[in-house]
Image (cartoon, grey):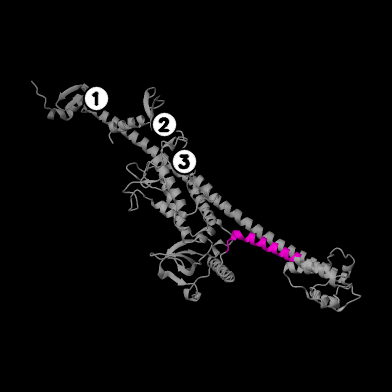
Amino acid sequence: MPAADIEEQLQYAVEDGLIMSYKAVAQKGSNVGLEQEGYRIAPYDDEDISEKGSHDWYCFNCHKAGEVVECTECWRVFHVTCAEEEDLSDNFICSLCKDSKKQSRIKRKALNRLLGFTVIRLKDKSKELHSFGGHVEGLNRFIFNYIDLNMMEEMTMKRRYRYLEQFFADARTILHNIFICYGECGFIPDLAGIMIRDCRYDLDEIRQCKDCYHHSNAKPKNWFCQPCRPAHDLVFAKQKGFSYWPAKVIKVTQEGYDVRFFGSLHQRATIASSAIRPIDISLKQLMLKRTVGFNKAMKELSLHQQLLESAAQDTDEQSGAENDPDDEPEKEEQNEKLAKVHHKKFHHKRHRGDDHGCDSSGFKSPSSRSQGVHEDSHLVSSSEDQVHAGARVFSTSDVAVQATKKSGRPQSRGMQTEEGEKSATVTGCNCDVKFSRMFEEYKNQIEADFRVDKERALKELEERLRKDCEEDKQMALSRAMTSVQREVESVRLQTEEKCKEEYFEEVKKLTDKHKREISLAKKKQWCYNCEEEAMYHCCWNTSYCSIKCQQEHWHHEHKRMCRRKRN
């Protein structure tokens, strides 16, 4: 664009109040101390939204101004040539609004949990987009709907997203705002383009398998062995230069099988169909070399198959009902409440039976049997039941039976034998001593089992914490290295650009100096003998700086070639 047209457009912008002109004194360069005219964006109040209107000013696809078509359900506008829809009538609806109306296959809570991982991945790769300078630099005048990665992360925490398309539309809004503020070229727009590419890739991964995406980001124990819904096909895949290796089939494309290998690194690759073998093939046919890595991969494969079988059994027992992991604590609480209610009812009935149908030995009288009073043949009562007639006294036998029911373990043979003896002996028995000893043995057994379980749980917790700490250290180190490399690369590019500018400037100065010296040298005469500046002219192309040089050159050769006319 010519300079005159630029000046004219700037004046129009000043008249419209979009920018303002000012004058300042130059502080460096060749114009130090001189007053110069400049332009900057005019201040803007965010509370005054009347200027923006109901829709954006710029096309959402190409991010440029012009004649646009407004969407009737959102603030976005499109050029006629940029709109993907064929219907551009008064009731125009953009593709983003249409995609947001599609039914989501993922529950809202699980969806926002997955999108939270996506936001974290995007923030790790592009820290400049956490909150860019729309509000700070006054560029919010040109931005209709401001959003950044921090705001998107907050929305995932509040579970605001209902669809994947809604999340991707917000990511595209960030790209749209950055293109408006910074243009199409530069470090920030390029970074926004990379962010959109990574976001599209992650959302495609969620659509492909949400369980794989969740496991790979949450990193639970044996995360790669956890089964997905639906389960992936298992194969042996072979890369060039490697042997056959167990792998999961993520998807099948025209290029081949997209697989992810078992093992320590869990690498992913696209393998041709000719290099795929079924998982149930004999290992002898593949002629495999059992290395440490291969054994570890086969161990992961075996664990994955076991988890698949257990998951299939659970599915059969539940008759196809799908359980949400977040609902398990609520179900456990309901089961405990039901158990407590049943326990209270059971003891209430037994209390009534002891008051109305038992004699001093704990056995029911014949009259109580004939009246059909509630029977508990497997419970043994103490001879002290009739001492306190108004209150229920729990004997050691009650405690032992209740502890056995709660723990879910069968009674020992000794306990059953002693119960038989108790039922056989009506009078003159030592029930308190026997059941006290049984209760003490059972108590010791419970304490021993508790100590063993406690030690095993502490070891598992320690190992899990150690692994989590190592993984966190590796992730922090990786993020730090990535950040440092990005900063070093940025500084290197800036330094190279600065060095290039200085180099070209120096070359330009030397070229001008050389031209001036050549021109000056051509305007002088030079001594033919010693090449110093000459002051004595002899003939058409011969001059000398002194008489000595003239005589030497004359006697040497010039007297035979001199063209000067002599009288």
Q: Position of residue 403 (x, y in %)?
A: 77, 67
Q: What amino acid does circle 2 point to?
A: Ala
Q: Is residue 503 above or below residue 122?
A: above
Crowd around label 2: few <14 · some 14–19 · many ≥20 (10 Å): some
Q: What amino acid does circle 1 point to?
A: Glu
Q: Is residue 316 visible?
A: yes
Crowd around label 3: few <14 · some 14–19 · many ≥20 (10 Å): some
Q: Is residue 339 magenta?
A: yes
Kindly report which numbered mark, 1 or 2, lies closer to the viewer in this rendering. Answer: 2
Element carrying mark 3: loop
Q: Position of residue 233 (x, y in %)?
A: 48, 69
Please, what is the dominant secondary structure of the magenta stretch?
A: helix
Q: Residue at x 88, y 77 (%)?
A: 426
Q: Position of residue 118 (x, y in %)?
A: 50, 52
Quadrant location, the N terminus: top left
In this rendering, the count of numbered labels is 3
- Residue stretch in magenta: 323-344
Q: Residue at x 36, y 30 (%)?
A: 14
Q: Looking at the rendered structure, which numbered label has been put on residue 132?
A: 3
Q: Is residue 533 left or right of residue 496?
A: left
Q: Nearer the viewer, residue 158 or 214?
A: 158
Q: Residue at x 44, y 55 (%)?
A: 101
Kindly report which numbered mark, 3 or 2, lies closer to the viewer in this rendering. Answer: 2
Provide the residue designation for mark 1. Answer: 533
Question: Which of the two discs, 3 and 2, labels the residue nearer the N terminus?
Answer: 2
In the current view of this chain or complex, which residue is farthest to the left?
567
Question: Which of the two discs, 1 and 2, labels the residue nearer the N terminus?
Answer: 2
Element carrying mark 2: loop
Provide the residue designation for mark 2. Answer: 42
Q: Is residue 155 above or below residue 362?
A: above
